[in-house]
Image (cartoon, helix red, strand yellow):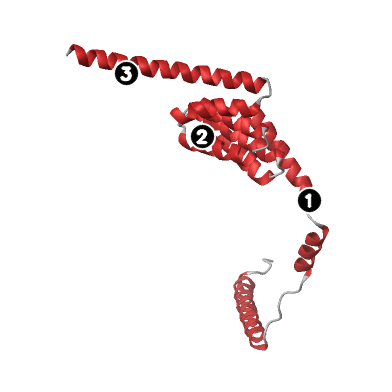
């Protein structure tokens, strides 16, 4: 029984040591990132992810390092993976926000708008995401203003006369109108006759 306890204790120690090593590698990557040594920072984060593929901090930071190396597509892929796999809404929000920022930088405005909306779904209080969403929407509106030709086409469509009725349809409508007119005339006749008999001056 003593051997089992010793084994469990040593496994726990290894796991704690690994977590400490992960933290050290992440800190090392952060220092390299601050020194603008993005490739080395990316490698430090990659070491963590090789041992712990779901480490959100390492994945997030590696995406930033990739972006700084002009590897936007790889960064977006990592951010998508992070947002998909995490259950933490704040991590999802940050991943979507960074994705939106990268896409805005690439002038992929519609995709960036979607990413900012996703970020706001996760964290509705994120002012930066809200501001960047507004900027992207305005930029998209400036980029794609309504064209004069489109407006002219719409006006022409509105001004087009209704399609002509066939002779048969016109006759049917005319008959319906005549029937309605007869009914109205008959009603008026009845009302006049009711009013005519009882009205008169009482001398």
Residue positioned 48% across, 29% down in the render: 49
User: Compared to 16, does 36 lie above or below?
Assistant: below
Horizontal side, residue 182 vs residue 81: left or right = right
**Looking at the image, which residue is at 80% across and 56% down?**
147
Tell me residue 164's x, y (percent).
71, 81
Q: Residues within 10 Å of mark 3 (few under 14, many from 20)?
A: few
Residue drawn at 66 percent across, 46 percent down: 110
Q: Nearer the viewer, mark 3 or mark 2?
A: 3
Give the labeled residue for mark 3: 11
Q: Which mark, by number, is residue 145?
A: 1
Question: In the figure, 110 relative to 122: above or below?
Answer: below
Q: Which residue is mark 2?
A: 82
Q: Are marks 3 and 1 in contact (CB under 8 Å)?
A: no
SS for callout 2: helix
Earlier-in-chain disc, 3 versus 2: 3
Which image quarter holds the C terminus?
bottom right
Quarter of the image holding residue 96?
top right
2 and 1 marks in contact (CB < 8 Å): no
Instruction: Give residue 132's quadrant in the image.
Output: top right
- Where does residue 144 sit, x and y in percent of width and height? 76, 50
Which of these two is toward me, 62 or 134? Answer: 62
Residue 56 in sight here: no
Q: Marks 3/1: CA distance?
A: 63 Å
Categorize mark 1 by other alpha carbons within 10 Å: few (<14), some (14-19), many (20+). Answer: few
Horizontal side of 199 relative to 149 (left or right) equals left
> Looking at the image, is mark 2 or mark 1 earlier in the sequence?
2
- Mark 3 or mark 1: whose residue is earlier in sequence: 3
Which of the two discs, 3 and 1, sits closer to the camera? 3
């Amino acid at each position: 029984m003593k051997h089992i306890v010793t084994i469990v204790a040593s496994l726990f120690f290894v796991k704690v040591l690994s977590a400490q090593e992960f933290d050290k590698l992440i800190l090392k990557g952060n220092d390299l990132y601050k020194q603008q040594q993005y490739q080395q920072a990316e490698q430090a984060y990659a070491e963590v992810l090789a041992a712990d593929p779901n480490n959100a901090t390492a994945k997030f930071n590696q995406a930033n390092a990739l972006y700084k190396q002009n590897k936007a597509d790889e960064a977006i892929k990592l951010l998508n993976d992070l947002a998909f796999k995490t259950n933490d809404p704040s991590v999802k929000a940050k991943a979507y926000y960074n994705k939106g920022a990268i896409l805005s930088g690439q002038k992929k405005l519609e995709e960036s708008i979607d990413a900012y909306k996703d970020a706001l779904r996760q964290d509705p209080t994120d002012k930066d995401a809200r501001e960047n969403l507004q900027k992207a929407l305005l930029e998209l509106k400036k980029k794609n203003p309504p064209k004069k030709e489109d407006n002219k086409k719409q006006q022409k469509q509105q001004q087009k006369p209704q399609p002509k009725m066939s002779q048969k349809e016109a006759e049917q409508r005319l008959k319906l109108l005549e029937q309605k007119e007869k009914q109205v005339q008959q009603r008026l006749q009845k009302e006049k006759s009711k009013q005519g008999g009882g009205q008169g001056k009482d001398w």
